[in-house]
Image: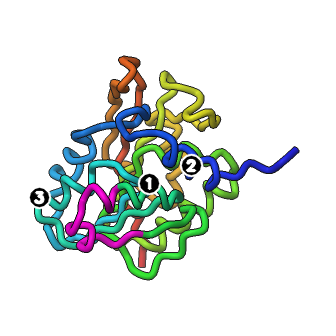
Amino acid sequence: MEKFDRKKHWESIYQTKELKDVSWFEPTPKTSLDFIKHYNLPITAKIIDIGGGDSFLVDHLLDNGYQDITVLDISEAAIDKAKLRLGERSNQVKWIVTDVTKFTPTEQYDFWHDRAAFHFLTDETEISNYLSTVQKSITPTGILVIATFSEQGPEKCSGISIKQYSEKTMAERLSKQFEKLQCKTIDHKTPFDTIQNFVFCSFRKLQVKQ
């Protein structure tokens, strides 16, 4: 059996579909913005959006004056679309094209945001690598926000099997490295008038006791 090529799959999606025609289309990512507002992130905070692709979160962050934004996506086509949409403002953003499971950060972040990239990781080694990367690359007081399909949500997305989480199972999976702060379940309405149930959870890195 041919090994699944994750990068090739996502490049094809972004090369053949318009943003308004994908299930994750969200002109105003309200829940993500609410988390940022809740934690009173200063405009100088280092923010990274994992799997940000051509989502609109970066537009809103720029609109709100944030000065240190990084967007990471496996698809170069997705990032190219975002750059085109933002025009000259794209120069204010750091863009990284890579698979997050192979990401080697060169700086630490105050806010790590992941809306629906984590749930595509179904291999235990990749999940562990991801969480280890976050643990090393988030500041001691930094915030981690992860959103995945809930146990009431879809079992697949874009033809790929995903890993569903509940508030309990996500907190348990991250418990060795992070403490849970809060979780919300959200119904996302797709452009096709279907509903996808997500669980959004925020975490802070566990402090090493001296």
The residue indicated by pointer 2 is: 10
Q: Where's the N terminus, which quadrant? A: top right
Residue lying farthest to the right in this orientation: 1
Which of the two discs, 2 and 1, labels the residue nearer the N terminus?
Answer: 2
| Residue sitting at x 44%, y 69% | 96
Relative horizontal placement of residue 113, taking residue 3 as reference (left or right): left
- Please name which of the two marks, 3 or 2, marks the residue nearer to the observer: 2
Q: Residues within 10 Å of mark 1 (few under 14, many from 20)?
A: many
Q: Which mark is residue 78?
A: 1
Q: Position of residue 176 (x, y in %)?
A: 53, 58
Query: Would you say the residues marked 2 and 1 are in contact, meaning their CB atoms lie under 8 Å apart?
Result: yes
Q: Report the span colored magenta.
A: 82-95
The residue lying toward the viewer, choosing from 164 and 140, is 164
Amino acid identity at mark 1:
Ala
In the image, residue 185 sits, relative to residue 38, either above or below, namely: above
Picture quadrant of residue 62: bottom left
Q: Where's the C terminus, which quadrant? A: bottom left
